[in-house]
Amino acid sequence: MAPGSRLDPETRQLTRAIARAGSTGITAKQLAGRVRLAPDRIDHHLRSLAATRTILRHGRGLWSLAQYADHLGPSARSPAHYAEGFRRGFGVPLVPAPTEIQFGSNERLPVHRWWPYVQGFSAGWVESVLRRYGAGPGTVVLDPFCGSGTVPTVARALGARAIGTDLMPIAAFVARAKLTWDVDPTAFRTAVGRVLARRGAPRLPLPFLRETRRQFAPAVLGRLRTLRESVDAEPDTDLGTLLRLAFAGIL
């Protein structure tokens, strides 16, 4: 039976939107953008559905259908349960990761910490996978969804040839910048000195960022504008790429 098939039109509309979110869940605010209901009506129906255990709340205000209870909260089954199901269903064993998979641990590592990227993998986990499959000198590693470049950066550190692509321009830019870690430090400090020395009255039109006035105080925005203009004057070289990444990283 389809979600909400025996419910009134408003509740049916809401449960179908929740069903589309799957076990990930959806917030009341997100629901307001997907259904044609006033916020107070959404809250009313969420409370009613929760009271009948049709939906459940988890995480930070997320709602999912109750059928996902086995995946969420204190009743969630262990990872070993799903690993065994995957092995039986597909004939592929899943092994425990030897290190943290999430990007957070990269914040302690040179180069990888230059640009926080929530959706990325940890460098330690990527290295363990690449070593398992023999990545090194004479091999080529391709990551078609490279994000901020963790896989290409680790692959290059292991001596492999690294190729990465990503649909997001900012991600592709960050990945390229992280692969320029071997620039001459003295030359980089000289370039920084040039950038700071030529800061002057800004000529860039306002705003150059979305919702600029709400995000920055006028005095801070003025300094950012002069700094950005000075950074943009640098040629499009490895040094210039690192300077642009440094500027983006302070925003």
Image: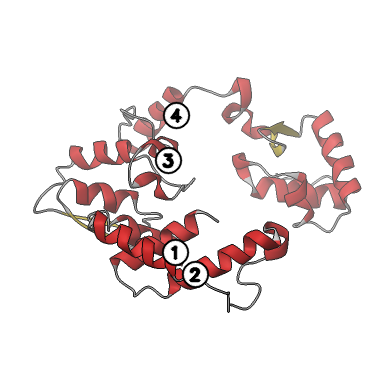
Marks 1/2: CA–CA distance: 6 Å
Image-quadrant location for residue 176: bottom left
Image depth: mark 3 or mark 4 in front? 3
Marks 3/4: CA–CA distance: 23 Å
Looking at the image, which residue is at 86% across and 55% down? 37
Q: Give the residue at mark 1.
A: 196
Image depth: mark 1 or mark 4 in front? 1
Q: Earlier in the sequence, mark 1 or mark 4?
A: 4
Marks 3/1: CA–CA distance: 32 Å
Looking at the image, which residue is at 14% across and 42% down? 134
> Dot 2 lies on which element?
loop
Specify the label residue 103 is tagged with.
Answer: 3
Q: Earlier in the sequence, mark 3 or mark 1?
A: 3
Specify the label residue 82 is tagged with.
Answer: 4
Q: Are marks 1 and 2 in contact (CB under 8 Å)?
A: yes
Q: Are marks 3 and 1 in contact (CB under 8 Å)?
A: no
Dot 1 amino acid type: Leu
Coloring applied to the structure: secondary structure
